[in-house]
Image (cartoon, rainbow, N blue to C red):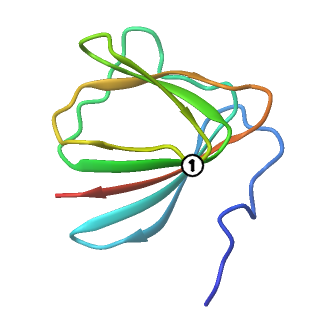
Amino acid sequence: MTANIFNDIPTNLPEELFTVLVENKNVRIDRIVSEGHRTPAGEWYDQLQNEWVIVLQGEAVIEYENTEQLNLKAGDFLLIPAGTVHRVVWTTAAQQTIWLAIHWN
């Protein structure tokens, strides 16, 4: 079976779109589509799993709890170790930002 990560994306996204592409007891691979979306003010992610994420299209800004911010554009990737408090403070509204996120223990 083949699929394309850029297919089956609605043109209007009132909320971020999360699609699980692969999942088993050790790993989960998600496609995330953002369009001007961000983590709500005052909310943070503090995950139990490691996360490796790459921006395939678009742009975003990730902020760590220590106020460090990372500007991401297509092709940029990063590792967010488990327990690293972070949030998405901005994604471009000019186009959809498509992320590939891999979570594992």
Q: Which residue is mark 1?
A: 75
Can you give x and y, in whole percent of width and height, for residue 37 in the image?
61, 26
Q: Quadrant of the N terminus?
A: bottom right
Please indicate whether residue 22 sits to the left or right of residue 36 in the image.
left
| Residue drawn at (22%, 71%) of the image | 25
**Type of the residue with mark 1:** Gly
Q: Quadrant of the C terminus?
A: bottom left
| Residue drawn at (28%, 66%) of the image | 27
- Where 83 falls versus 42 (above or below)? below
| Residue drawn at (17%, 43%) of the image | 48
Residue at the right extreme of this rendering: 11
Can you give x and y, in whole percent of width and height, for residue 2 in the image?
64, 85
- Where 33 falls versus 35 (above or below)? below
Count of numbered marks: 1
Q: Quick one: 34 or 72, which is closer to the camera?
A: 72
| Residue drawn at (16%, 34%) of the image | 83
Can you give x and y, in whole percent of width and height, for residue 80 in the image?
28, 40
Residue at the bottom extreme of this rendering: 1
Please indicate whether residue 68 sits to the left or right of residue 74 in the image.
left
Q: Residues within 10 Å of mark 1 (few under 14, many from 20)?
A: few
Q: Quick one: 71 or 13, which is closer to the camera?
A: 71
Can you give x and y, in whole percent of width and height, for residue 19 in the image?
54, 57
Q: Quick one: 67 or 8, which is closer to the camera?
A: 67
Which secondary structure lies at badge 1? loop
Please indicate whether residue 27 sits to the left or right of residue 20 in the image.
left
